[in-house]
Image (spheres, helix red, strand yellow):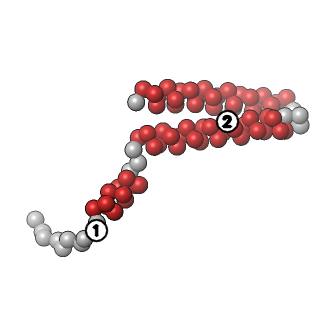
Amino acid sequence: MMNTPNIGMPRPMAVMGLDMMAPKRNVIADMVMVQILSMILILLGVLLFKGATLNTEQATVYLVALMLSITLLGAVYTRISRM
């Protein structure tokens, strides 16, 4: 085994770097939840504020996307609660 020089990186700094580069599983699930929630809010905002100007086909697409994203949110929440 080769002896390599020990470059003195403080241990707390190394641990912080590892924590940032390899997040825990629950952090990733939280990030997914935030993305799904923001998608739901955007879809609701479009339907509430521009619903009168949407034609039937566009409104249907937004409603289906809203329903699917709420279903996806429920699935992710169920998975998180099992962890």
Which residue is the extreme one toward the right?
53
Look at label 1 and name its amino acid: Met
Does 60 sit above or below residue 32?
A: above
Residue closest to the eye, 59 or 26: 26
Q: Is residue 10 left or right of residue 42?
A: left
Q: Residues within 10 Å of mark 1 (few under 14, many from 20)?
A: few
Q: Is residue 27 left or right of residue 41?
A: left
Looking at the rendering, in which quadrant would you find the N terminus? bottom left
Look at label 2 and name its amino acid: Ile
Q: CA distance from mark 2 to mark 1?
A: 44 Å
Q: Residue at x 52, y 31 (%)?
A: 76
Where residue 20 appears, x then y in whole percent? 41, 55
| Residue 58 in sight here | no
- Which numbered dot is residue 40? 2
Label 2 SS: helix
Q: Which residue was labeled with disc 1?
A: 9
**Quadrant of res 33:** top right
Where residue 19 appears, x then y in whole percent? 37, 53
Label 1 SS: loop
